[in-house]
Image: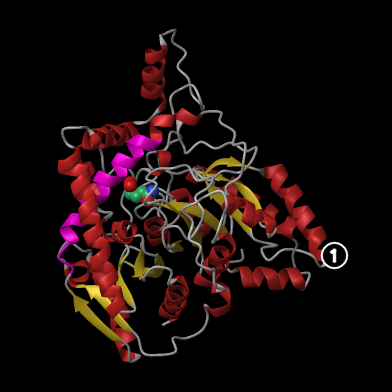
Amino acid sequence: MYKAFDDIKKALSEGKTTCVALVKDYLARIEEKKHLNVWNEVYNEEALQQAAKVDQKIKEGNAGRLAGMVVGLKDVIAYKDHGLQASSNMLDGYVSPFSATATERLLAEDAVIIGRQSCDEFAMGSSNENSAFGPVKNNIDETRVPGGSSGASAVAVSDDHCLVSLGSDTGGSVRQPAAFTGTVGLKPTYSRISRWGLIAYASSFDTIGVIANNVPDASLVLEIIAGEDDQDATVAQEPVPSYSASVEEKPAKKLKIAYIKETVESEHLNKDISEKTFAKIEKLRAEGHEVEAIEFPLLDYLLPTYYILTTAEASTNLERFDGVRYGYRTEDKVDLEGLYKKSRSEGFGDEVKRRIMLGTFVLSASYYDAYFSKAQKVRRLIKETTEKILSEYDFILMPTTSAPSFEIGKYGENNLLELYLGDLYTVHASLAGLPAISIPNGEDKDGLTIGLQVMANRFEEEKMLQFSHYLQEL
Ligand code: GLN
């Protein structure tokens, strides 16, 4: 199977393959790997028809820039007239009446969408075990989780079910699964990509992200889906550079890179991850770049701030699922209030309910100032402090996760906090609204993949993509 879009384009232009042949291969692979539980729905016939149209366009010489790219969508990204469910019973039977802007832009460039992928329910989780359709297995070790919440999207790319996936990243959901599956996971600056058609989890954090086998593919997709959109007033007006044109350039000057001391030297960090991270740091130094350890005194505040603010926003966003407007409705004969309550109790899974309750609590009159207001202030401090670091350094480098993928079922109701703690390295960029990317950085002693994360300043995706491509090749 092809691992890079450049190779596909070459094979298509030399007549060595067709878009239909590619889709057939992916469909066969999806069927063969059904037990991994990656797909909530596969668009078999339709994808083949779409591919035939693309082949025709290629023949006529008027195909778009993504002709030959087969894409999977996380089940939180809308595709007109297709099911959209966020892996939740709450949206049982829901069909989206419109497409996400990102979806439309992919289609306009002739990408083929092959299906929608499982995820943690409403994108809440770090393991893809919280889907109403059961856990997703990691293709690298089937007893382990693929990460979450875009775990299935990462497996789909790593295991050749499609070339690229669109996921969503609120606190690491694209980067952490990328680390767990040996793929590249890109979260752009907040507001770089339109959120129109993305099911909301925590709106001031949510971004669509890209999972690919390599940085150039991720760059091309970002370039196509990013930028202004009349449907989403929060999208940045900032022009979108041609990321894919510059991604393979080497850094023009010696770079200054920071790493937060505790994130790499902590005794809680897995030994292999720490070693591999330092090995890269040494390589960068050998190339003449400056890499320095810095302090980040707000480290302990990252997780509490993230979980207070995101649950608060989630409790508000998920209010709309009331059993009347979308999807699931209780069958019991009850009054209106009972209908809301019963539909929500039956439709949502445990993790989603937990977060709605926590979010409602931190927003309640007596606790609003103590939790929500305070967390907002801390978020501002985190943002300002991080931006200050990035005005002095080109990038912040850190592992994507503190440990590699874990066994399915390892975390239950009694040690959930431990699972949340695993998000420490990814929530930083999300709180600050900054772009970050996870690239593969080898394996641990058991063959489990490790991710290395690069964080850059606002709208510095171009520089970040270039650097991470270079870093991966080092
Ligand atoms: N694991 C984090 C959470 O559960 C991140 C999820 C996400 O980015 N969607 O909130």
* Label 1 Cα crowd, 10 Å radius (few <14 / some 14-19 / many 20+): few
For residue 379, above or below residue 466:
above
> Which residue shows up at 39% across the image and 22% down it?
346
Residue 313 percent coordinates (x, y): 33, 41
Query: Can you identify the residue that label 1 sits on?
Result: 60
Task: Name the image quarter holding the N terminus.
Answer: bottom right
> Which residue shows up at 74% across the image and 55% down it?
20
Residue 290 percent coordinates (x, y): 28, 87
Q: How many numbered tags mark residues here?
A: 1
Task: Name the image quarter holding the C terminus.
Answer: bottom left
For residue 55, above or below residue 309:
below
Which residue type carries mark 1? Glu
Give the residues in magenta: 296-317
Secondary structure, mark 1, is helix
| Residue 135 in view here | no
Drawn side of residue 139 relative to residue 370, left or right: right
Residue 294 percent coordinates (x, y): 19, 75
Drawn side of residue 200 relative to residue 18, left or right: left
Q: Is residue 378 magenta?
A: no
Colouring? secondary structure
> Which residue shows up at 78% across the image and 53% down it?
52
Q: Quadrant of residue 278?
A: bottom left
For residue 296, above or below residue 343:
below
For residue 270, above or below residue 150:
below
